[in-house]
Image (cartoon, rainbow, N blue to C red):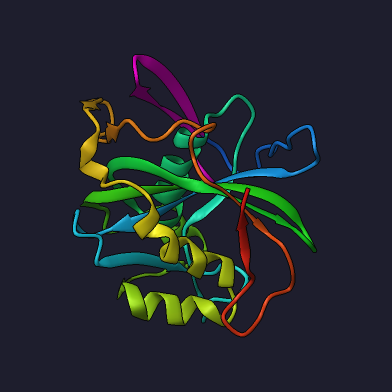
Amino acid sequence: MHSTFRISLKHEGCEYMMTFKPNQTRIYDGEGFKRRAACLCFKNEKEDEVLLVSSSRHPDQWIVPGGGMEPEEEPCGAAVREVYEEAGVKGKLGRLLGVFEHNQDRKHRTYVYVLTVTETLEDWEDSVNIGRKRKWFKIDEAIQVLQCHKPVHAEYLRRLTVTCNPTCSSTCCDPTNGNTWVSPLTDDKAPHYVTSTQGTDRGPPLVNR
């Protein structure tokens, strides 16, 4: 049985409680899009190596850790929770890379953040419960690995160069769980990308709206 517990996170003067509970209700926005959050987890601030995890549905495939937001959960809190559960890492949460919208087979909007890993757990929730694995990849290698089955995830990495350096904002640290927060772009200032068609062999073209 999965355990349930809560941790407290502080961001820009506000405190958020995150509940770690399996099979919790996910949320949708007013347009029917499932709200998701994900993190590109980097080994250091050079952002030259990224951590991918094995897919729960297809264990031989690698994906960017992320998942659905929970009721009353902020995107930044959901992103940190998801990488803790799926990848077993903590770190310094940086900028909001963008909001990626997919409206084909399953409608969802994913808030993608950048995180610099500072702590790696030997055993974590998904490794114990479903045997999930993790692996560090060079950026070019990760894009190539993701392109075949998760082209939108590959696009996250291609968009790295269009956002600011993660060290440009002030930080605040919450001692509860060791996560440090770097003030990211707000939702209205973050780039919004929309998957416009089925795409090509390089993946679905994204339109910056």
Q: How many marks?
A: 0
Residue 100: x, y in percent?
Answer: 59, 52
Q: Residue at x 22, y 29 (%)?
A: 171
Q: Nearer the viewer, residue 120 or 76?
A: 76
Q: Position of residue 88 (x, y in %)?
A: 35, 53
Q: Residue at x 60, y 45 (%)?
A: 36
Q: Is residue 15 above or below residue 143?
A: above
- Which residues fall within the magenta stretch? 2-19
> Where does the image place residue 82, in percent across and percent down from the top left?
47, 47
Q: Quadrant of residue 174?
A: top left
> Would residue 147 be visible to someone looking at this image?
yes
- Principal SS element in the magenta part? strand
Q: Hey, which residue is sitting farthest top in the picture?
A: 13
**Residue 158 forms part of the magenta stretch:** no
* Residue at image coords 63%, 48%: 209
User: Foreground: 91 or 185?
Assistant: 185
Vertical comparison of 184 with 208: above or below: above
The relative height of residue 156 versus residue 147 in the rendered view (above or below) is: above
Residue at 52% x, 33% y is 187
Q: Is residue 1 visible?
A: no
Q: Nearer the viewer, residue 126 or 195?
A: 195
Which image quadrant for residue 32?
Answer: top right
Q: Is residue 138 left or right of residue 133?
A: left
- Horizontal side, residue 85 vs residue 71: left or right: left
Residue 62 in the image, given as x and y percentages of width and height:
48, 74
Query: In which quadrant of the rendered view does residue 69 lie?
Result: top right
